[in-house]
Image: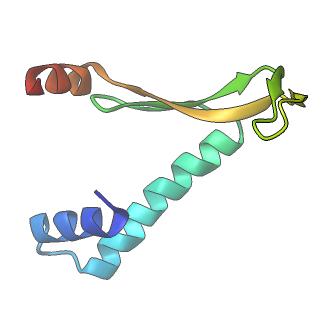
Amino acid sequence: MTKSELIEVISTQNQELTKKQVEFIVNGVFSSIKDALKTGDKVEIRGFGSFKIREKNSKVGRNPKTGDKVEVPSKNVPYFKPGKEIKELLIQAD
């Protein structure tokens, strides 16, 4: 599902809101999540899951073209952990 499809679904479920209003709300939610992660905070949405930043340590990799060893620096990566309800829903889908 894309962001525009999400906006479409929410606007059809909430006829009292215009698409512009729904788009503003969805953009605000995503922006708030990004801002929290940027400052190192964890974002937890009960029943859905949590977002946080994980630090990946530096490592020695290899250049696939030449085979030479290359130092890969440490970096921060976003991580999503699904909540219990999402996990149970996905297990039932199998």
Please state, as top left, top right, bottom left or bottom right, where the C terminus lies in the image: top left
Tell which of 42 and 71 is nearer to you: 71
Residue 49, image quadrant: top left
In this view, 44 is above or below 6: above
Image location of residue 75, percent across then percent down: 78, 32
Location of the N terminus by quadrant is bottom left
Q: Please state if 11 lies on the left or on the right of 78 as rendered.
A: left
Q: Quadrant of residue 91?
A: top left
State whether residue 51 is above or below residue 21.
above
Judge left or right: residue 1 versus residue 66: left
* Residue in view at x 14 percent, y 75 percent: 16
Please name whichever residue, 17 or 11, is drawn nearer the observer in this view of the structure: 11
As drawn, the residue found furthest toward the front would be 66
Above or below, 62 relative to 18? above
Q: Is residue 31 above or below residue 58?
A: below
In terms of image quadrants, where is residue 27? bottom left
Q: Residue at x 11, y 64 (%)?
A: 13
Residue 12 position in % (x across, y down): 12, 70
Report the number of numbered marks: 0
Q: Depth check: 33 or 79 in front? A: 79
Q: Describe residue 92's horizontal placement relative to residue 60 as left or right.
A: left
Image location of residue 93, percent across then percent down: 10, 27
